[in-house]
Amino acid sequence: MKAGFVTILGKPNVGKSTLLNSLVGTKVAIVSRRQQTTRDAIQGVLSEPRGQIVFVDSPGVHVPSKHLGKRMMQEVDRATHGCHATLVMTDPTSGLTATDEMAANLAKRLAAPALLLVNKVDRIKPKELLLPFLDRCRNLHDFAQFIPISALKRTNLDRLLHELFEILPESPGYYPEGFVTDQPERFLAAELIRERILRETHDEIPHSVAVQIERWDGTGGKLRIWAVVAVERSGQKAILIGKGGEKMKQLASKARQSLEARFDRPVRLEVFVQVRKNWRNRPRFVGELDFRKIMGDT
Ligand SMILES: Nc1nc2c(ncn2[C@@H]2O[C@H](COP(=O)(O)OP(=O)(O)OP(=O)(O)O)[C@@H](O)[C@H]2O)c(=O)[nH]1
Ligand SMILES: [Mg+2]
């Protein structure tokens, strides 16, 4: 049996979390059209007859300006610790940029082999258009493999898994079978609520939103969750709540549906919106969002 850790790296929005979900076959990471959706290193575990791969999703590689961004880049670093291989993802629909180079440079620093993935190939027609892009990717690093994929349509993921199992060492699995992610349920719930907000808001709001679970009661037939949504300005709070509370009612109802689907039981969700001025630059608040600090979550 083979087993090991594989880190997914790349600039924001290339499809890292989509790939993680497709590989693991369960939704473990939230996905949105926005840049910098993922803020933490998140594990998703694939267990199958050939062995076990612990995929580690990471925040998009970027040059941070606020404390939150700096912490996200520390999470990228954390995601690479002890990995047996890295996947550097690129996106031909957005071209090759300096942040792709940053991601490749992170992989270069590591002893583990790196594979280059060209994602979103479902959007490139005809396929020959990929060739000049691939050529430019070759200049980034001496990658072990170049694999065109579609994380969304699951194209060529078999080949990716085949190559990974070739690289990984003989080893027993790291986690028991059935274990899919290292995140506590409370954190996953907060993320699913944040995903809903990212999908339904525009402009600056997505970046300014943080979600924390204040109370969690799984003792009855219904799972009861009290969530606090922090935004940075009172104008943002007004937008989230909407006229007569309509917008928040809609958001909470859709978030509740995602939670019910993920936790497979009825959910009662209460959401409170709070203004935490400039929270992205407040280390203490940003530190409180760390899911490794969320204990006793069941
Ligand atoms: N067409 C197409 N879209 C994709 C594919 N993979 C991801 N996307 C879309 O790209 C957007 C970003 O996907 P994410 O998985 O959130 O990207 P990410 O790299 O995790 O982004 P950050 O967490 O912000 O760094 C979403 O709208 C996805 O649906 C793909 O293979 N094909
Ligand atoms: Mg992501």
Image: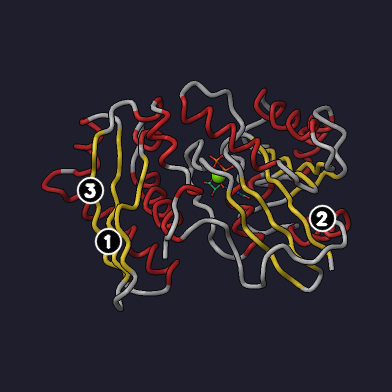
Q: Residues within 10 Å of mark 1 (few under 14, many from 20)?
A: some
Give 184 or 201, whichever is nearer the viewer: 184
Give the residue type at disc 3: Phe
Residue 114: image x %, image y %? 81, 41
Residue toward you, 61 or 43: 43
Q: Is residue 91 above or below residue 191?
A: above
Q: Secondary structure at mark 2?
A: helix
Dot 1 corresponds to which residue? 269
Mark 3 secondary-structure assignment: strand
Q: Position of residue 174 (x, y in %)?
A: 72, 62
Residue 189 location, quadrant: bottom left
Pointer 3: what residue?
Answer: 272
Indicate left or right for 171 with 182 as reference.
right
Q: Quadrant of the C terminus?
A: bottom left
Question: What residue would you read off at disc 2?
Answer: 164
Cα–Cα span, label 2 and label 3 = 44 Å
Q: Position of residue 262 (x, y in %)?
A: 45, 66
